[in-house]
Amino acid sequence: MKKLLAILATTALVSLTAPALAQEKTDVTISQAFQSLLYLPLYVAIDDGMFDDAGLNVTKESAGSGPTALNSVISGSADFSLHGPEWTAIAFEKGAPVKTIANVVNGAAVWILADEDFDYKGPESFSGQTVVAGMMPTTSTSLFLKLLSEKGVDKDSVKTIQVQIGAEPAPFIGGQAPLAVMYEPGVDQAVAEGKKVILSFPKEYGPYAFSTIMARSDVDEDKATKFVAGLQKALETIQKDPAEAVKVAQKEFPNLDPKVVEAAVKRMIDDGVYAPSVDITKEAMETSLGVQIALGNLGSQPDFSKFVDKTFIDKAMGE
């Protein structure tokens, strides 16, 4: 009888503690360069519970820049960072213990816009014109300058009004220049005011590792496995359910016009900006870093097999 009572007591204790144990999650911190519609897959994974389902309690911090976010990882104050892979490649080149473990943005998310009556016949139309662009160094202006060089347009023949990143719409809409180079949501803010998109870099370049997840070389494998798995589900959701992606974006950016947010998210989905999966191809990474090499910001392509760790990608994709 005593043995039976002991078994029943143990069973009751297990049933009482099991739910509490099931709710325990691993704390993880990710440092993003800044709050951006580009990073929507991260927000979907957080807001729609993909990380919760993977057993993680994710804290998101905004560093203000890519290098600052990456330094948070190197110093150990963050588990992961999200920004352009060029900053990680530069640090990697200098011997920093860092690597890339997942894709988030797989398109060169930059567009060139013009006044409605601007007669665009190709990049040669930029000669002699004034363009509003983000303050260097930034990928948007870098891509524009690289385009001029590739198409044989003298960059000195193009006047650029460089402003803080995100501030491009105001001078452009205000008439200070007939052309602008920018990211979303500035693109669709300008389109809503009657401007037109004349060139899409995502379509121009195709797969392009624009923003990726970074970690230390000695990253906790359990955390990384769960984090990349949650991100994979978020990327799948964006592709299968654009309406849900828009809903999360509008929640994350309550101060923006909901219609602008919707248009921006749909444009990035249609132009292939959000990665279809967490996978990173060698070609997409080399295309991305090739721009930085051409501009003199990076010495050479890193060894892909060492710079990109596909261990967690393969697990997330069931390979």
Image (spheres, rainbow, N blue to C red):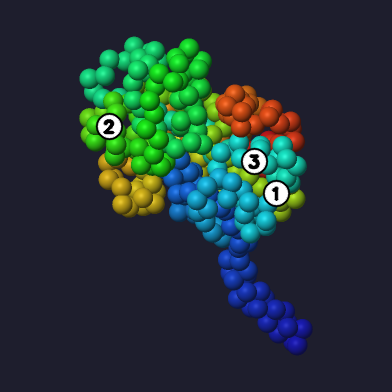
In the rendering, which numbered label is found on residue 88?
3
11 relative position to 58: left or right = right
Labels 1 and 3 touching (C-beta < 8 A): no
| Circle 1: element type | strand
Type of residue at label 3? Thr
Name the quadrant containing residue 241: top left
Q: Earlier in the sequence, mark 2 or mark 3?
A: 3
Q: Which of marks 2 and 1 is nearer the N terminus?
A: 2
Neighbour tally class for label 2: few under 14, some 14-19, many 20 plus, Cα within 10 Å: some
103 relative position to 128: left or right = right
- What residue is shown at x 39% (from left), y 48% (from top)? 248
Residue lying at the far bottom in this picture: please name it: 2
| Circle 2: element type | loop
Q: Earlier in the sequence, mark 1 or mark 3?
A: 3
Viewer-side residue, 121 vs 28: 121
Q: Give the residue pinned by disc 1.
A: 216
- What residue is shown at x 69% (from left), y 28% (from top)? 300
Q: In this view, does 294 lie above or below 134?
A: above
- Whole-angstrom CA distance, mark 1 to mark 3, is 10 Å
Name the quadrant containing residue 95: top right
- What residue is shown at x 66% (from left), y 47% (from top)? 215
Q: Give the residue pinned by disc 2.
A: 176
Where, quadrant-wise, is the N terminus in this rendering?
bottom right
Q: Is residue 239 above or below residue 28?
A: above
Residue lying at the far front in this picture: please name it: 156
Type of residue at label 2? Gln
Closer to the eye: label 2 or 3: 2
| Circle 3: element type | helix
Give residue 288's position: percent from left, percent from top: 58, 29
Give residue 317's position: percent from left, percent from top: 62, 38
- Whole-angstrom CA distance, mark 2 to mark 3, is 36 Å
Inspect this view and state whether residue 20 appears. yes
